[in-house]
Amino acid sequence: GAVVSQHPSRVICKSGTSVKIECRSLDFQATTMFWYRQFPKQSLMLMATSNEGSKATYEQGVEKDKFLINHASLTLSTLTVTSAHPEDSSFYICSANEGVSNQPQHFGDGTRLSIL
Amino acid sequence: AQTVTQSQPEMSVQEAETVTLSCTYDTSENNYYLFWYKQPPSRQMILVIRQEAYKQQNATENRFSVNFQKAAKSFSLKISDSQLGDTAMYFCAFMKAQAGNNRKLIWGLGTSLAVNP
């Protein structure tokens, strides 16, 4: 079945560091990927829609300059948390749709980001 | 705009018993998809079951089944013969049926299910 790989699974770094998270579709092309943020015991919050070859679409309230998204190929989207601070600590998950409209989204395993 | 409501933040059930998780949604769309996702402590998102709105027959996947009431906009999940491994957060989600890859999921707040031995 379709697989989405997300890397790294865990990041611990100092405040002020920029962190890049990768999301890859392994056996299908994904012109669109989604980036979510999830706080403990809460639902997924859509941050942005990543579009291959064009600018990402950010949800209201999400800082574009803080969360940089690049979708340079049909199988890779990256989320860079720039100058991360402790309040950016969270669980980040990506997902992607296969091309067929009735297929469900496929999720990466998530990245647990901890900023000290 | 579409909304998804899960009115049960937490539930518990004894092993081997049956439990039903509720989900209601609001939409003006006629064609859409509904999903139940499971998120165990490992935090992987696992698709449990899905339902196409144009299908009247309720979807089933082994011990998991849904009661889809389109007119009432209700989409409950029944877990039969509950197992300890069913302990997880369960999210109900809605997606419009549309062409292309830009198909967003609208999420409920989730129900935390604990299966007790």
Image (tube, coloured by chain):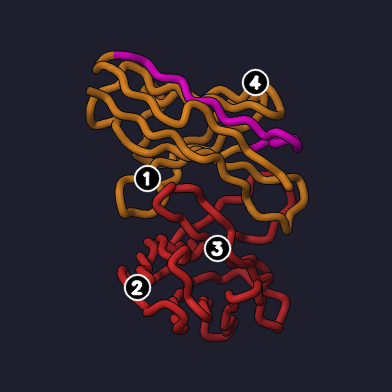
What subunit carries mark 2?
B
Residue B76 makes an appearance in the image: no
Chain appearing in red on the rendered image: B
Q: What amino acid is at disc 1? A: Gln
Between circles 2 and 4, the one closer to the viewer is 2
SS for tag 2?
strand
Identify the magenta region.
Answer: A17-32
Name the residue at 26% across, 16% down.
A14
Reading the chain from its start, which is encountered first: label 4 or label 1? 1
Q: Give A66 or B114, whichever is nearer the viewer.
A: B114
Of marks 3 and 2, which one's residue comes earlier in the chain?
3
Which residue is disc 2 drawn over?
A: B116
- Residue occupied by mark 4: A72
Query: Chain drawn orange, letter?
Result: A
Q: Could you confirm whether marks 3 and 2 are on the same chain?
A: yes
* Labelled pair 1, 3 in contact (Cβ < 8 Å): no
Considering the image in quadrants, where does the C terminus of chain A appear? top left
Q: CA distance from mark 2 to mark 4?
A: 47 Å
Circle 4 — which element? strand
Q: Can you say whether A116 is above or below B47 in the image?
A: above
Q: Which residue is mark 1?
A: A38
Tell me the distance, in whole angstroms, between the alpha carbons under discs 1 and 3.
Answer: 18 Å
Residue A88 appears at what percent x and percent y?
29, 30
**Structural crowding at the residue carrying mark 4, measured as other residues with C-alpha within 10 Å and reported as few (<14), some (14–19) or many (≥20):** some
Q: What number is the disc on residue B94?
A: 3
